[in-house]
Amino acid sequence: MRTTKAQSEATAAAVLDAAQRLYGERGYADVALEEIARTAGVTRGALYHHFGSREGLFTAVVERVQQQVAERVQQAAQAAGEDAWEQLVAGCRAFLLASTAQQVRRVLLVEAPAVLGWARWRELDARHSRRLLHEGVQELQNAGRLHDAQAGAVTAVLSGAMDEAASWAANGPDPAAAVDQAWQALQVVLEALRTTH
């Protein structure tokens, strides 16, 4: 039983690996399930068994990529030390850097909203990076370190700014320079939210 479960998990992981790479390179519309199954070394039936449908597989890929980005954000925040403000800043920068990787940006910021719709995309995003951002904002507001604004509104503004900044930077002729410029602009936004006391 344990071996069968391990084999099943390995099959699902192989399909997700292949789908994440192919969707990141070419997008949802240009990748057939047959190609994903072939790349993963599984049958199309196995793919349907694990993910149910083409959209089901894509949704699983989006959630996986969001989780990977959220892990990078969390790692950066933890590495920043005990100060909640430094954690927020480090997490925001990590999100920008992780999201501007070409395949990540394409899956999360281009394909996901178009394929799944904005409502579903926001729902999935809320489970991962946006949840972490909200927790950081709420902690700073509770400590009186952010200007008095509703935490949900601050989270939405910062999240939207970071998504747009990541998309803008990744699409420029010099993404590395654009990331630095986008980060400078985001720091201005962050500093405007911070109280001086």
Image: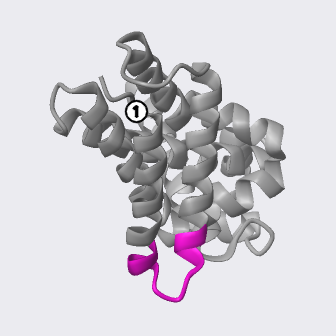
Q: Position of 173 compared to 36: left or right?
A: left
Q: Position of 150 compared to 1: left or right?
A: right
Mark 1 packing: few (<14 Cα in 10 Å), some, or many (20+)? Answer: some
The answer to whether one can see residue 40 in this image is no
Residue 68 screen position, x and y as percent: 43, 46
Q: Which residue is mark 1?
A: 194
Where the N terminus falls, by quadrant? Answer: top left
| Of 113 and 151, the residue lying toward us | 151
The residue depicted at 37 percent of the width and 52 percent of the height is: 93
The residue depicted at 77 percent of the width and 75 percent of the height is: 30
Residue 122 screen position, x and y as percent: 71, 37
Q: Give the tally of numbered discs.
A: 1
| Of 182 and 120, the residue lying toward us | 182
Q: Quadrant of residue 15?
A: bottom right
Q: Is residue 173 above or below residue 33?
A: below
Q: Position of 49 compared to 85: left or right?
A: right
Q: Is residue 181 above or below residue 145?
A: below
Image: magenta residue range: 168-178
Q: Is residue 11 above or below residue 148?
A: below
The residue depicted at 46 percent of the width and 54 percent of the height is: 186
The secondary structure that most of the magenta stretch takes on is helix
Q: Amino acid at mark 1?
A: Arg
| Of 86 and 123, the residue lying toward us | 86
The residue depicted at 52 percent of the width and 49 percent of the height is: 65
